[in-house]
Image (cartoon, coloured by chain):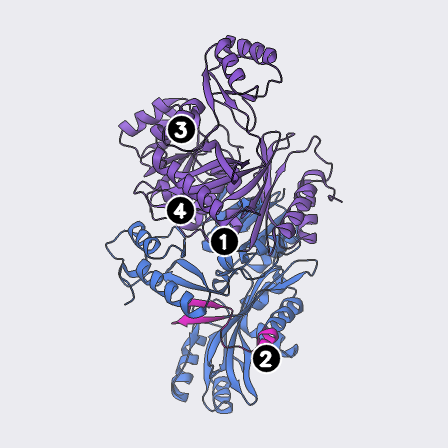
Chain colours: A blue, B purple
Amino acid sequence: MPVVAVIGDGQLARMMQTEAIELGVETRVLASNDDASAAQVFGDVRLGDYTVLEHLRAVVDGADAVTFDHEHVPNEYAQLLIDDGVTVEPRPEALIYAQDKLEQRKRLAEAGLPVPAFAAVESVADAEVFWDETGGQVCLKATRGGYDGHGVWFPATREECAELVEELLGRDLPLMAEQKVAFTRELSAMVARNRSGDVRAWPVVESRQDGGICRVAIAPAPNMSAELAERCEELAVRVAEGLGVTGVLAVELFEFEGENGPEVSVNELAMRPHNTGHWTQDGCVTSQFEQHLRAVLDWPLGAVDRCAPATVMVNTLGGEEDPDTPMSERVIAVMRKYPQVKVHLYGKDHRPGRKMGHVNVNADTVDEALAIAEDAAHYIINATWKD
Amino acid sequence: MPVVAVIGDGQLARMMQTEAIELGVETRVLASNDDASAAQVFGDVRLGDYTVLEHLRAVVDGADAVTFDHEHVPNEYAQLLIDDGVTVEPRPEALIYAQDKLEQRKRLAEAGLPVPAFAAVESVADAEVFWDETGGQVCLKATRGGYDGHGVWFPATREECAELVEELLGRDLPLMAEQKVAFTRELSAMVARNRSGDVRAWPVVESRQDGGICRVAIAPAPNMSAELAERCEELAVRVAEGLGVTGVLAVELFEFEGENGPEVSVNELAMRPHNTGHWTQDGCVTSQFEQHLRAVLDWPLGAVDRCAPATVMVNTLGGEEDPDTPMSERVIAVMRKYPQVKVHLYGKDHRPGRKMGHVNVNADTVDEALAIAEDAAHYIINATWKD
């Protein structure tokens, strides 16, 4: 059976390990420390730094495929590994479009895919032109390195925009501007694609963010026409195929009111398992973590049928304060009240806002699943019930 | 979060680890070697021998609960650990009834539970008396140490029975005799019970054996009245409660034609996750492995609702010869033909008859799930399709 090396030690790598165990796929992880989320649960842990080529070379040696739980491995190093004959998935020529927002916008626009109006910002003047063109509907973004709401700014006035751009460019931050979308909600269309071109799209979900951090995913996205759902799935497939993505791809979408009803445009891309896909662990025949392993090994992809009419995922983000009630007592209380809740924890210590785990709930209706999942997550975070 | 120490390094421990990762429960395993099925996938592997008290003491040190993937830890050692203040589940006073078939029969009969006629066999005369009482419907069993068809004999004649008993007693094998049951099929009723007395019963399944080894499990057991299914589940609950079992309990049953329709009697007990419960990984809200961990931690038990109308599990037992086609190629072929098949492999090298993995299939009907699961398992074993 093949060996997969995973670069990155977070919860995504951890949850890949769960599926690898059942598939009988051997794994190793490159981790920064022994106590990292994934390092706790891999049998073969290599300590090192993913920005050091020698550490990368050591962990990939003899592996049949190499993949990531984040997009921060320097592309030139990934390319060197490929030049060594290593199978690295996704490849740098695809990954660049998840890493560089400006390159991504250009490429998606060229392909005729829906993206908000955008412009490179290399000077204050660039920003001012864009401000005027959009009537001040401006979102500034670092083209690289942003995540979970970091690296995104919404200046309120033309002057604030100009000052911000001056300051950020002064820090050598590569910038772009994008037209703010008056979205009605956020969606996520996820697909997996293997090197041979096999593609499978999960049902599109509604995601709810809090301060730029995903908090809830609802599958399937409620109150959506079959036509729009299909359009979102096709869009994600086109992105995966157009960019040559291997593995799991999340296409985060804005839904907004168009002239002829709801429309979507692309917000972000992630080329790895994604928070908005955690529901697939308990809500789909094949989870995003199993599918990612299959895709990077160029194995046939699994069925993505749902297991229940509705599945809701709610993150258990670290609260402002960590309650005195130990985590195990909180889990016990949730399990007592809700025997159907699936608790997933990442082995992380408390930090405010930190992604420490999530709960998944299957039910006959979205409302029922959502109410249970919200209440359960609230207790795990706060040691109190929601109402 | 609590720490669970697992004694035993087989696939049952391996599949507990899968669930422990998601629950955020920390684990360690006592393994005989680094390459054992479970040792491959635990972060914390302690090499040692489960019949050596010092090795047991080392692995359980500081653990919140200790459990097993087999029933072979000497009870006197388990008791010493309990005397040290360690939480060991299931406890020796329950385990004895899974270890000693004669004690089990006596206890179940006392409790009014259905068991075949039986007798201790301490001499050839004992066996001959039983032979005559049952009209030669005799099954001889080693009271301890049997598994997967080992330790069970079916003498064809009174003379053969006498000779066999003489030989086995001469080897100091403790023996019992049991009336052969003209069963129509085998069933398995599985429950989990935690120390606080919370009990949950999975739907009763039909199991199909081959040479004493479980090969197929069909959930729910087809062609069974709701009344009989309920009776089987209640029976399993009574056994769990009567014997004070903690963790997962499998009650293997014979179904036979009684005077007023189908009846059942108890065949075997196992106090751990069981081969006939592997289907719960993909067919139930809570798998037997998660439930076992929850039970031994005295956590509330999870829902046992089914995820599909029918789930079938087929073991991938090592064939007489290992095909030249590598296992990964066989898995790929199965995944290509059947995107809905869930492949589970244990990381074991080939040996004829060895339990190397299993497949689970959910479908709308038993027939459909069975046909797919049989074909998929056949390919994984033989690298050829069934037809």
Crowding at dot 1, Cα within 10 Å, few <14 / some 14-19 / many 20+, comes out as many
- Magenta extent: A206-232
Pointers 1 and 4 in contact (C-beta within 8 Å): no
- Secondary structure at badge 1 equals loop
Labels 4, 2: one chain: no
Disc 4 target residue: B200
What is the x, y in percent for residue B305? 46, 53
**Residue A114: mark:** 2
- Secondary structure at badge 2 equals loop
Real-space Cα separation, disc 1 to disc 3, in angstroms: 32 Å
Specify the amino acid type for callout 4. Answer: Arg
Real-space Cα separation, disc 2 to disc 1, in angstroms: 41 Å
Q: Where, quadrant-wise, is the N terminus of chain A in this rendering?
A: top right
What is the x, y in percent for residue A263? 55, 82
Disc 1 target residue: B306
Nearest to N terminus: mark 4 or mark 3? 3
Which chain is mark 2 on? Answer: A
Nearest to N terminus: mark 1 or mark 4? 4
Specify the amino acid type for callout 1. Answer: Arg
Labels 3, 2: one chain: no
Please name which of the two marks, 1 or 3, marks the residue nearer to the observer.
Answer: 3
Disc 3 target residue: B109
**Residue A326: mark:** none
Pointers 2 and 1 in contact (C-beta within 8 Å): no
- Residue A226 inside the magenta-drawn segment: yes
Q: Is residue A321 above or below residue B219?
A: below
Real-space Cα separation, disc 4 to disc 3, in angstroms: 23 Å
Q: Front-most of A77 and B83?
A: B83
Real-space Cα separation, disc 3 to disc 2, in angstroms: 72 Å
Which chain is mark 4 on? Answer: B
Crowding at dot 2, Cα within 10 Å, few <14 / some 14-19 / many 20+, comes out as some
